[in-house]
């Protein structure tokens, strides 16, 4: 293997990532969706790598995969490191696996140097972080936080299989799901590619995540009246398409204004616009849009959504349409990263000559759920052009290694400083 820098072997990380990437649907690289035979093959490969690193391998009842290294002081809580190995269809090689392999490398670095931490360390591959066919993301990390409900286990894929049965199929035991809930985690650290352009454009080595945004998705339907595009005078129209278009504009303009207000990161996107009858010479009768709003600040996010609801009512009035529906489809609250862990990451990076930047995560990650049960933090590494969820996704070997260095430094600092909470 290659030369180690600050304990981390860049070529070992890279060869592992490329080997795991080989386990893909050959017709659609890079595809390794959760619950599929390919996903299981990837996990078999991970199990072997975990075992070769001297880790005790196990699945929990939610089918999260762990490799555990005991600490020197019995009874101390666990330092957990990791991410996910599943992908979206035709995804990349780094979203998820970079965090699992970097976590494994941290443990290997400790083993190679004969250093034993006081705390046990676990490397985790969380089950089904990406949206699966069962319509749910972050399945495994939800379970660790005690937030995977019976209703969620009853979700079905298009073939009619229950999520709970799929978890059994990959080695879990949802009947004993409570056992997957963790109360022994001292710290959770996740390395992930940024999936954005901030680090690349600012030529910064690593990002230290301040918070994972909250997300509220809204469905709004305007009902107007279909009419002939040539004969219906403008003043008499009830155009649902115009109503929807005005609201699309409002969401974007308002998000821009709020983003400049100094209350953290906020974005608003209308990604779904359905118009009926969607014909060139017909005034639209019905329009449905789905709005995705995200912000670091929970109160700001709620206020933004309330403004969109109020504006949709006003627009319906002004366009003589009926706002038939304005429904919250999903709601995820923002998750703050732990200030002490953030400081340890920044100190560790600086000690190794790495530049770092504090930035929010606009995407959801397993760390959002683990932050409900433990202090959690994330390291972002730059990726080319911010591209992700695509085969072109790319992160430089040195960039991932730099992130792993920051992770290792933070783990060692945490281990040295953390009080013996569980030992008392
Ligand atoms: Zn991911």
Image: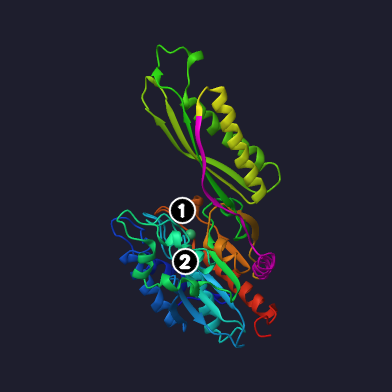
Q: Nearer the viewer, residue 22 or 169?
A: 169
Q: How crowded is mark 1: few (under 14 residues within 10 Å), some or many (20 or more)?
A: many
The disc label shown at residue 197, or none: none
Q: Quadrant of residue 87?
A: bottom left
What residue is at 66 percent from the left and 75 percent from the top? Answer: 414
Quarter of the rendering occupied by the N terminus: bottom left
Residue 113 visible, this orientation: yes
Q: In which quarter of the image is residue 232?
A: top left
- Residue 330 shown in magenta: yes
Which residue in the protein does label 2 denote? 140
What residue is at 47 percent from the left and 26 percent from the top? Answer: 240
Left or right for 76, reference 68: right
- The x, y position of residue 343, in whole percent, is 69, 66
- Residue 28 shown in magenta: no
Query: In 3D space, how far apart are the residues under numbered discs 1 and 2 (Cα atoms)?
Result: 22 Å
Dot 1 or dot 2: first in sequence order is: 2
What residue is at 62 percent from the left and 40 percent from the top? Answer: 306
- The x, y position of residue 366, in whole percent, is 52, 63
Which residue in the protein does label 1 denote? 388
Q: Nearer the viewer, residue 247 or 352?
A: 247
Magenta residues, start to end: 323-351
Left or right for 202, reference 69: right
- The x, y position of residue 413, in whole percent, is 66, 76
Left or right for 225, reference 253: left
Q: Which of 148 and 86 is in front in this view?
A: 148
Q: Nearer the viewer, mark 1 or mark 2?
A: 2
In the rendered image of this protein, does residue 387 appear above or below residue 121? above
In the rendered image of this protein, does residue 129 appear above or below residue 306? below
Q: Quadrant of residue 358?
A: bottom right
Quarter of the rendering occupied by the C terminus: bottom right
């Amino acid at each position: 293997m290659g030369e180690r820098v600050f304990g981390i072997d860049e070529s070992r990380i890279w060869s592992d990532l490329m080997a795991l990437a080989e386990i893909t649907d050959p017709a659609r690289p890079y595809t390794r969706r959760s619950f599929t035979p390919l996903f299981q093959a990837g996990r078999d490969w991970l199990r072997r790598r975990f075992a070769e690193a001297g880790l005790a391998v196990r699945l929990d009842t939610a089918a999260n995969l762990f490799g555990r290294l005991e600490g020197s002081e019995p009874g101390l809580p666990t330092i957990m490191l990791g991410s996910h190995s599943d992908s979206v269809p035709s995804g990349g090689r780094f979203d998820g696996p970079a965090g699992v392999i970097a976590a494994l490398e941290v443990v290997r670095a400790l083993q190679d140097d004969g250093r034993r931490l006081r705390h046990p360390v676990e490397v985790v591959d969380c089950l089904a972080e990406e949206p699966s066919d069962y319509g749910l993301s972050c399945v495994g990390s939800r379970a660790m936080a005690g937030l995977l409900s019976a209703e969620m286990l009853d979700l079905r894929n298009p073939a009619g299989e229950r999520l709970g049965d799929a978890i059994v199929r990959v080695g879990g035991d949802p009947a004993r799901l409570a056992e997957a809930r963790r109360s022994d985690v001292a710290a959770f650290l996740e390395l992930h590619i940024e999936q954005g352009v901030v680090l690349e454009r600012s030529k910064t080595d690593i990002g230290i995540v301040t918070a994972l945004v909250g997300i509220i998705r809204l469905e709004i339907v305007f009902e107007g009246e279909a009419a002939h595009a040539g004969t219906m005078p403008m003043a008499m129209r009830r155009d649902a398409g115009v109503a929807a278009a005005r609201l699309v504009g409002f969401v974007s303009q308002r998000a821009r204004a709020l983003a400049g207000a100094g209350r953290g990161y906020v974005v608003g996107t209308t990604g779904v616009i359905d118009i009926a009858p969607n014909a060139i010479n017909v005034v639209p009768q019905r329009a449905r849009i789905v709005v995705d709003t995200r912000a670091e600040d929970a109160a700001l996010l709620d206020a933004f959504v309330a403004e969109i609801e109020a504006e949709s009512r006003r627009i319906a009035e002004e366009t003589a349409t009926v706002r038939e529906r304005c429904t919250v489809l999903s709601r995820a609250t923002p998750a703050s990263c732990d200030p002490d862990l953030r400081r340890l990451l920044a100190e560790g990076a600086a000690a190794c000559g790495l530049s770092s930047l504090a930035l929010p995560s606009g995407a959801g990650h397993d760390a959002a759920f683990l932050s409900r049960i433990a202090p959690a933090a994330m390291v972002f590494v730059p990726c080319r052009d911010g591209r992700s969820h695509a085969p072109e996704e790319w992160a430089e070997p040195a960039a991932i290694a730099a992130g792993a260095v920051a992770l290792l430094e933070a783990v060692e600092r945490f281990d040295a400083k953390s009080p013996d909470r569980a030992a008392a």
